Image: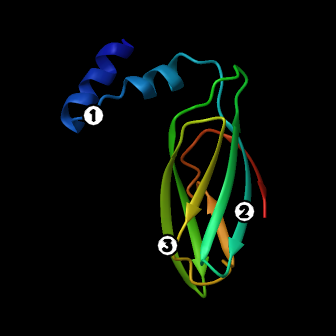
Amino acid sequence: MGLLFFTAFSKPLGANLGWFEHEWFYRAAFPHYFVKQSYDAASKTLTLDVTQKAHDGAPFRMPVDVAIYVNGSGRTFQFVADSSHQVERIPNVAAQPQMVLFDPNNNILRLLDYQK
């Protein structure tokens, strides 16, 4: 059944969803993200240090939205979390963010530890 289901969605989207099928339908695990953030005022860069762990030891590949709020204005940055550890640098952040939300809409089945 899985093969037909993903084939039906892959064709109209023009995208291979095999990675999603493998990770979310055949693995008995889900990601646990550990996130640390820092801001460099000189370069106006927000840095996210993201560590990912799962019960089976392998990282998940998942697009992640990050909402950044500065001076009452928000913007969204997206990256692909696909390794056990990665550092994402977000340029052009005008000032120290008042709020940063990792997966703000809770789209990902996950655990999250966020150190700000």
Quarter of the rendering containing residue 16:
top left
Disc 1 residue type (three-letter): Ala
At 19% from the left and 35% from the top, the residue drawn is: 12
**Which secondary structure lies at badge 3?**
strand
At 57% from the left and 83% from the top, the residue drawn is: 94
Q: Quadrant of the N terminus?
A: top left
Mark 1 / mark 3, whichever is N-terminal = 1
Decide if residue 64 is on the left or right side of residue 38: left
Give the spatial CA distance, label 2 vs label 3: 16 Å
Question: From what the image shows, is residue 5 above or below residue 38?
Answer: above
Image location of residue 83, percent across then percent down: 60, 36
Question: From what the image shows, is residue 67 above or below residue 19?
Answer: below
**Residue 15 got which mark?**
1
Decide if residue 34 is on the left or right side of residue 69: right
Decide if residue 99 is on the left or right side of residue 78: right
Mark 2 / mark 1, whichever is N-terminal = 1
At 73% from the left and 67% from the top, the residue drawn is: 38
Image location of residue 70, percent across then percent down: 60, 82
Mark 2 / mark 3, whichever is N-terminal = 2
The residue where tag 3 is placed is 75
At 27% from the left and 21% from the top, the residue drawn is: 7
**Residue 37 got which mark?**
2
Q: Quadrant of the C terminus?
A: bottom right
Q: Residues within 10 Å of mark 3 (few under 14, many from 20)?
A: few
Disc 2 residue type (three-letter): Gln
Question: From what the image shows, is residue 82 above or below residue 39?
Answer: above
Image location of residue 56, percent across then percent down: 69, 19
Q: Nearer the viewer, residue 105 or 53?
A: 53
**Which secondary structure lies at badge 1?**
loop
